[in-house]
Amino acid sequence: MKIAADFSQRAVVHSQLQEWVASPMAGVYRKPLDRVGAEVARATTIVRYEPGSEFSEHIHTGGEEFIVLEGIFEDEHGQFPAGSYIRNPPQSRHQPSSKGGCTMLVKLWQFDANDRTHVRLQMNKMGKTQLHDNNQVAVTPLYLDDIEEVSILHFQANATYSLEAKGGAELLVLEGSAQESTDTLNKHSWLRTPIGSNLQVKAGEQGATIWVKTGHLTQVEEQIARVTNA
């Protein structure tokens, strides 16, 4: 299966307008954003757990990165409410569930093969720092290594921000709205731009909170190769 699989092209999905698609597990539904592969896939997906639903225990051979957007996600490591940012690296294992239901952004098979760093953060409880060159935008750093950088950008109303994405970029609007090029991005709209792109983001009248990931698209071919061989 291939969805938005040409990583040299810009991709935009307004996930709030998508229909939910049933997954192989009862009570778990998905909205695909990008995907290369079948059930084992390099994939970016909005996932919904109905109350009381669960997945069987499994190993994330290629790693799993997710944000809890609504509700509470649970596994044997704890309860993760809305605002949680989690990185379960390659070869990690868990049994996910949600007693009350939850909605998440989930990214699979998008780690460096040697990454073994676990990250568990409560984004809503973290501070933010004003950008030194832009007093209308603040940042909450989430993750940084030699390949990628992940953060939350907090925009005041109508604030603008320029982003040079040498290694590609991916954005998810968590709150508010923003304009980038000709696209208006509302809550849970997703944007992916290719290697070498330059973004000009302008927040809407209510401001915006945007999850931003950069640098990682330099690893796409290697990740797809590992999925194919899994």
Image (cartoon, helix red, strand yellow):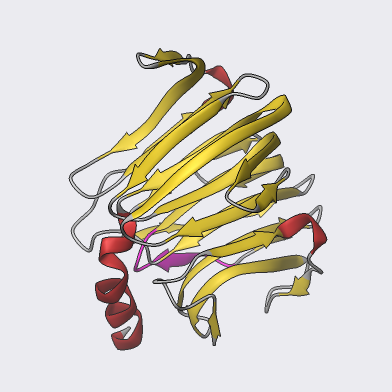
The picture quadrant where one finds residue 7 is bottom left
User: Residue 162 appears at what percent x and percent y?
Assistant: 43, 35
Q: Which residue is found at the position 56% from the left and 24% from the top? A: 154
Classify the position of the N terminus by image quarter. Answer: bottom right
> Does the magenta segment cover residue 199?
no
Q: Which residue is found at the position 22% from the left and 50% from the top? A: 147
User: Residue 229 appears at what percent x and percent y?
Assistant: 29, 87
User: Residue 137 appears at what percent x and percent y?
Assistant: 50, 20
Q: Give the left or right position of residue 109, taking residue 156 as reference.
A: left
Q: Indicate whether 32 appears above or below 40.
A: above
Magenta stretch: dominant SS? loop
Q: Give the left or right position of residue 181, taking residue 183 as reference.
A: left
> In this orientation, which residue lies closer to the viewer: 31 or 180?
180
The picture quadrant where one finds residue 89 is bottom left
Q: Give the left or right position of residue 127, taking residue 180 as reference.
A: left
Q: Which residue is found at the position 29% from the left and 47% from the top? A: 148
Q: Which residues are magenta?
A: 56-63
